[in-house]
Amino acid sequence: MARRDDNRGGRNQREEEQSDIVEKLVHINRVAKVVKGGRRFGFAALVVVGDQKGRVGFGHGKAREVPEAIRKATEAAKRALIRVPLREGRTLHHDVQGRHGAGRVILRAAPAGTGIIAGGPMRAVFETLGMHDVVAKSQGSSNPYNMVRATFDALQREDSPRSVAARRSLKVSTLQSRRPGADADAGAEA
């Protein structure tokens, strides 16, 4: 009997994790198939989901009705969540570029109080991610699918100082003391 209780507890915990996920509809595309009786419409939805604590994902769903397409896209997005390291829980650790197809994006870390300076599809990604300060520029394709995929490409290239230090077998403090301009910061503090 105790085993069943543990299993239910695990399920409830998973449901709690899913309940704090924020969904944003980025784009709906309507397509028409011409048949003998007229036109048959189908819908494609692009959805971004995130927990606003550093996890984000996107999904694409297609169906004959809009709510069904959104549901499919949301399920796909929840299956494809990625974790992004954030500095102080509000911005990027470093500037990064991403691309997908003809879509190119540049993401830059920003000081506190800057806010999210980004276009529609990228803004949805940053809001669901929980990022508060970022400056982003989209170059090339303005297609929402390419912009979202390019943004995710850039976010996956993001490294935290902890992961870089582990890769180089260094301490984080040693790594950050080597930063360009760190000597100027140390001189100003003294």
Image (cartoon, rainbow, N blue to C red):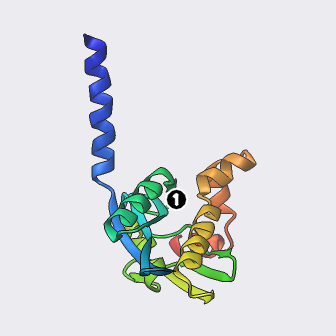
- Please provide percent x and percent y for residue 173: 60, 54
- Is residue 28 visible to us here? no
Q: Which residue is drawn at 35% across and 62% down?
A: 68
Give 80 or 164, whichever is nearer the viewer: 80
Q: In this rendering, would 7 be left or right of 104? A: left
Please tell me in which quadrant of the rendered image residue 146 appears: bottom right
- Please provide percent x and percent y for residue 134: 47, 78
Please tell me in which quadrant of the rendered image residue 96 appears: bottom right
Give 93 or 69, whichever is nearer the viewer: 69
In the rendered view, tell whether residue 145 sits above or below residue 170. below
Residue lying furthest front: 36
Q: Which residue is drawn at 62% across and 70% down?
A: 154
Q: In this rendering, would 112 be left or right of 143? A: left
- The amino acid at mark 1 is Val
Q: Mark 1 points at which residue?
A: 84
Q: Residue at x 25, y 10 (%)?
A: 1
- Please provide percent x and percent y for residue 14: 34, 39
Disc 1 packing (10 Å; few <14; some 14–19; many ≥20):
many
- Please provide percent x and percent y for residue 78: 43, 53
Residue lying furthest right: 168
> How many numbered markers are drawn?
1
- Is residue 6 visible to us here? yes
Q: In this rendering, would 189 be left or right of 178? A: left
